[in-house]
Image (cartoon, rainbow, N blue to C red):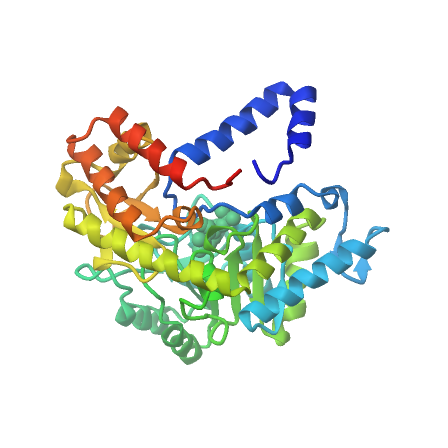
Amino acid sequence: MAVTPTLETDVLRRQDPELAEILLAELTRQSTTLQLIAAENFASPAVLAALGSPLANKYAEGYPGARHHGGCELADVAERVAVDRATALFGAAHANVQSHSGSSAVLAAYAALLRPGDTVLALGLPYGGHLTHGSPANFSGRWFDFVGYGVDAETGLIDHDQVRHLARDHRPKAIVCGSIAYPRHIDYAFFHEVADEVGAYLIVAAGHPIGLVAGGVAPSPVPYADVVCATTHKVLRGPRGGMILCGSELAERIDRSVFPFTQGGAQMNSIAAKAVAFGEAATPAFGAYARQVVANARVLAGHLAAEGFGVVTGGTDTHLIVVDPAPLGVDGRSARGRLAAAGIVLDCCALPHGEGRGLRLGTAAVTTQGMGETEMVLIAALLAGVLRGDHDPAGVRAEVRELTGRFPPYPG
Ligand SMILES: Cc1ncc(COP(=O)(O)O)c(C=O)c1O
């Protein structure tokens, strides 16, 4: 792997061959199968180098200039660089880059704005809401009173009339918009208007589209939201982690809700890696990448429709596609298993108003590998071939190996 210099791989191999073998096998798995999980990407060697740097050793509770530990001079510089790059990239007054994950960013946002028992309006889980949008298995469902809005049964698009009615009926303390399976742009101006009308905070859960926002190919929630929560992996292509953007009036509340309310020491190696990713995302090359991600998703969605899949919302504006494989005679859950056997890795997801499970795909990782529209046409054909039973899995596995061999995620 380019990021792990041979020397370090050799060190690991010598010291702990068992783990070295697992890590190298994972690299082989990622490089020789098709990564279509919409939440995944290939972070750059520079991002991975920052993750594996000595900042991983540093304890740094608190914020730059106000730490509870000594020796934070350079950690402070790294965090200030990350914050400055994030605020510049997204045009936000304030950024907190310490959240360990997307879920902990949402937890901190709720902690800053809500009290247990408050009512929150969010996209219902069957329609693509995340666990943090009121799942009974998650802190959100246990501590807050969630009301779910849905999508139109015909179009699959967010039902704006329902959002407005539910907001007027329930007078939520916060409205959450954002999804793990919504392939279209979200109308943040609409949500802002409704939140304003009922006196609710607007929290945008932008983990999926935030990389497209950085690349200039999706609308920004920043001008409309009180708080934007996001992940730094996915299309944004940084390390696994979270971040929060907000205006200066909420900055102190958000910071205190991250540390000390919901987290202890910041993961400084991860913050440095976030800084590297924000730097990469500010380049023209990343804009070109984001455009290609969407172009690829559109072609893939179109060809999946032509192959007979039911495409939720009829297509996509983003990196994400949701399809119903039922017309090909298979449910999402068994489709995922059959595709995995052929080296095609993707997720099942709920189908709004549908029977059974759907499939969720994304083009972030394959686009990082350099694949374009031609390869999307081939991928659609491979998926359909496997599920229809026209192609035997071993034959498709060989085609996937050939395809990924032409587009290695970490060349050299
Ligand atoms: C909207 C949204 N919220 C929260 C999360 C959770 O992120 P994590 O898995 O890092 O906790 C995600 C990740 O898929 C997301 O898309």
Locate the N terminus by quadrant.
top right
| Along the line of sight, the residue nearer the viewer: 14 or 186 | 14
| Along the line of sight, the residue nearer the viewer: 126 or 28 | 28
| Along the line of sight, the residue nearer the viewer: 52 or 289 | 289
Residue 211: x and y in percent read: 47, 59
- Tell me if 381 is positioned left or right of 213 in this view: left
Q: How many marks?
A: 0
Residue shown at the point (60%, 25%) measured from the top left: 20
Q: Is residue 73 above or below residue 166?
A: above
Residue shown at the point (75%, 42%) measured from the top left: 54
Q: Is residue 63 visible?
A: no
Q: Quadrant of residue 16?
A: top right
Residue 137: x and y in percent read: 44, 43
Residue shown at the point (20%, 42%) measured from the top left: 325
Residue 264: x and y in percent read: 70, 49
Residue shown at the point (46%, 64%) measured from the top left: 287
Q: Residue furthest right?
A: 70
- Tell me if 52 is positioned left or right of 139 in this view: right
Q: Is residue 216 visible?
A: yes
- Tell me if 211 is positioned left or right of 109 in this view: left
Residue 92: x and y in percent read: 57, 72
